[in-house]
Amino acid sequence: MLFVTRSDRQRRRRQKRKHPVKRVLLLGSVVLASALALGALGLVGYVLAVADDAPNLDQYHSRVPGQYTQVFAGNGQQLGYLSSDVLRKQLTREQQPNLLREATVAIEDRRFWSHGGVDYEGLVRAAFKDLFEGDGIQGGSTLTMQLVKNIYLPTNIRRNLKYKIIQAKLANELESRYGKNWILTSYLNDVPYGTVDSQSAIGVGAASKMFFDKPVQGLDLAQIALLAGLPQAPTSYNPFNNPSAARARRSEVLAAMLQAGYITQAQESRANASSLQVVANSSLDEYQQPYVMNYVQQQLVADLGQGTVDKGGLKVYTTINLADQAAAKTAIAAHEDEPGDPAAALVSINPANGNILALQNSTKYGEGPGETEDDYAVQAARQTGSSFKPFVLMTLIHDDNGNPNDTYYNSEPLAAGWLPGYPTYAVANASESDAQGLISVTKATTLSVNAVYAQLGVDLGMTNVSAMAHAMGITAPLDSNPSEAIGGLRIGVSPLQMADAYATMANGGDHVAPTIISKVVLPNGKTRYFGDPTHTNVFSQGQAYAATQVLKTVVQYGTGTEANYGCPAAGKTGTTNNYTDAWFVGYTPKLSTAVWVGYPNADTYMNDVNGLGPGYGGTLAAPIWHDFMQKASDGYCGDFATPDQYWYGTPYFGKHTALVPVYTPPATTTTTTGTNTSTTGTNGGNAVTTTASTTANTTTTAAPPPVTTAPTFSTPPAANGGNGA
């Protein structure tokens, strides 16, 4: 039996009293363990509560950036890409190189193929960091979680523990629904790779073009490793801005690929020794024909809707003929290319189908000095001067069956007060020689006599003229003011509208809405066709032919002789008050072309451009039209087809129509005696008498009276007019 002495007991009590810290540590350990257990339970409860309240995947709308859209000329040559701050090209699984997929997994989520949507170890580490350091959670995300962030979760919320829990829940849903291959493919299409010159590359397809100017299928191992390292910190690793950091990051990717067994040591060494190989690529934000590209984008939105255009991924084939574009540029530069020269714009359309073949401006596109983004060919709203007169002519022919050869007006200038109700409205002609007394509408067209057309317009009714202009292709608002008959418009029109409207005469009476888009291949491979718009009949082929015969005289021996390039053509000059706008709009059976010349500031007069004197349409615009048509016609010199049924018309009589003296045969007297006659008549105005007998049985027939009646007249509002030439 073992006995413990009293002294032993005292010694043991003294030893225990010597170590109070151990007791505290023991107690603290127990408390800490209890707290951690309670904390863990609380954390688990918090996670479960947040996950339970979080929306499901179906309650979110995927946020997929649009792809870039390619644009091609009529011959298939690429013009460029539609401008966008975000560049993206979606690739299929088969289009993504296996080596690229392996590099991404190796550096971003090496256990991607083995874990679910969430790497719980990484998530717990990130959660404790958030709890104890108080910063927003960084790291712990799988590729699946990053995909959820890129296309589902809002971008403007704080990335804390709650965010991470919701992200993890959605990641698990995504994996269970789509699987690993779909997730990796989508990630590579939707992760940001960096920004160059204010344009961000989303997805590896756009990144490959941005950094190497080649498709991703053509990248080597070193280039693939560089791209795979960018998503973690696109700005820090941008090879253009931080080449040293980009090279170091590439080495990390290569090391991770070697460790994962995707590449050999020799491959890693060769890739590490390679230069960065980056190539600045301007093709994504610079393009040929910038004015064309802008108009293409406008028409895409009108045809397909803003949403489809924003999503992108389109292949747009335009109607633009690059040879005609070059011809237009050359023609304009030959006449308006000196410092201080006015601007010029040209639009040419195929009358048969409305295809826009050329759309050219003299100005340089941009925002710098001497540059402009204003597209005068499409956007200009300028007064037309006398080039508006063919709409009056067609109203006469179509609405009132009036033959311009047989309809006459007084060509003298009209003093203020000629039009009741508008005491200040006066009409002057471009030249004193235009005042030739009574002349036909045809001659008034040839010489561009304002006084005749001002009267004709109000006689026909300017509301009818406006309706005709709109039916033929003018889209600008018209006020039906009397001065619109001679081109005095309140708002003005563009060269595109004028070329479109004249094309209605060129093709024999059908309006075909202009289009710059031939077809669009959608991302799903389907094709939408726009190159043959609907034809709307406005007037008969015979009526169009009659108007063309009148307008041919303008080119042959009227105000537009400078446009004559030796082939059948019809058209009309136009000059506005004070020479602020000069036009020639004309057509052949194959082309309808409008040329406008003027300073962007509509108050700047063209009094003497390049020593040519006042800025008439016949001296400034017609020569450009001549040069372009001579080249663009490409050897064609055919005449207008005769109609199946000719149109003849009748003289038109309005309130202001002149009653032209018509030759009236004098009375005829016949005297009969038996079988002999005596006839008294005229021969060239001289009396001729033949007598065979003196017996008188006389009959006298009087000449018919001339027609003097005219239709009723309604008065439209008044405005100012143009110069006439």
Image (cartoon, rainbow, N blue to C red):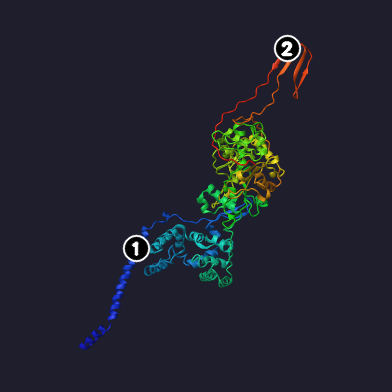
**Number of labelled discs?**
2
Q: Quadrant of residue 639?
A: top right
The foreground one among 673 and 25 is 673
Q: Quadrant of residue 152?
A: bottom left
Residue 395 visible, this orientation: no
Q: Amino acid at mark 1?
A: Tyr
Find disc 2 in the rendering and name its residue: 697
User: How far is mark 1 from mark 2, CA to CA?
Assistant: 132 Å
Location of residue 168 with respect to 509 vertically, above or below: below
Determine the residue located farthest toward the right in the rendered image. 692
The foreground one among 252 and 603 is 603
Find disc 1 in the rendering and name its residue: 46
Give the image location of residue 195, x and y in percent: 52, 62
Q: Are marks 1 and 2 in contact (CB under 8 Å)?
A: no
Report whether 680 appears left or right of 508: right
Give the image location of residue 472, x and y in percent: 59, 39
Secondary element at image label 2: loop
